[in-house]
Image (cartoon, rainbow, N blue to C red):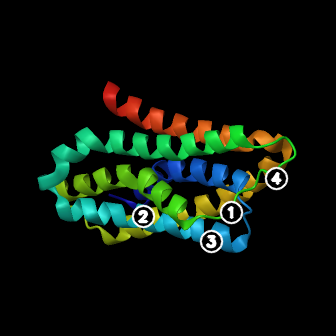
Amino acid sequence: MDLFSMFFLAVGLAMDAFSVSITRGMTLKCNFKHAFIIALFFGGFQALMPVAGWLAGEQLATMVEVWAPWIAFLLLLLVGGKMIYEGLREEDGEDVCKVFSLKDILILSVATSIDAFAVGVSFAFLNTPILMPILIIGLVTFGLSFLGCYIGKKMGHFLGNRIEILGGAILIAIGLKILLENLVT
């Protein structure tokens, strides 16, 4: 696989993390440190999951194909549903920004990187060396996630006090998209 193809694969894998980082930027009291941590988690998981898939190879390929979309959907549904619930409970004057939670970021990191596991399995089948792709995948995801936090932070100010509901709906929509794409194909 050439560098050009690896870069576009990385961008494709990073889109879910980018979208989720925008929602986190909208709903968190997100500063440079938080944006860095979110980007580090998302980029790190996107880089590590292909390694796990590559190592697992053929043994887990069938299970991943069947269950990965459901796992991603359920994780995003849980986090998105929690956000919507919290958004509906808020009073009109209440500050919409939430406290940074490593637990939520960890769950979102796993949910958005499951497809990278499947890519790692395909790398094993194709006998593709793993080092360069994971470096590119990790760095691209890190950069887009960091950028996404700041885009979300700017957008959150314009959308008012119901941003939590919108963010939750976006996460659920991403999970549904992952599920439907894999059920249809």
Q: What element carries label 1?
A: loop
The mark closer to the camera, 3 or 4, is 4
Q: What residue type is labelled 3?
A: Phe
Depicted 168 relative to depicted 38: above or below: above
Looking at the rendered structure, the number of numbered marks drawn on it comes to 4
Look at the image and tell me in which quarter the N terminus lies.
bottom left
**Number of residues whose C-alpha sits closer than 10 Å to that of mark 3, classed few (under 14), some (14–19) or many (20 or more):** some
Horizontal relation, residue 93 to residue 51: left or right = right
Q: Is mark 3 on a helix, strand or loop?
A: helix
Q: What element carries label 4?
A: loop
Q: Which of marks 1 and 2 is nearer the N terminus?
A: 2
Q: Earlier in the sequence, mark 1 or mark 3?
A: 3
Which residue, given by chain and number where applicable, does mark 4 sit on? 95
Q: In the rendered structure, are the residues bearing label 1 and label 4 in contact, judged by CB atoms less than 8 Å apart?
A: no
Q: Distance between the residues labelled 1 and 2?
A: 22 Å
The mark closer to the camera, 1 or 3, is 1
Q: Distance between the residues labelled 4 and 2?
A: 31 Å
Quarter of the view holding residue 25? bottom right
Residue that appears at 18% across and 60% down: 56
**Number of residues whose C-alpha sits closer than 10 Å to that of mark 4, classed few (under 14), some (14–19) or many (20 or more):** few
**Number of residues whose C-alpha sits closer than 10 Å to that of mark 2, classed few (under 14), some (14–19) or many (20 or more):** many
Q: What residue type is labelled 1?
A: Val
Quarter of the view holding residue 169? top right
Which residue, given by chain and number where applicable, does mark 3 sit on? 36
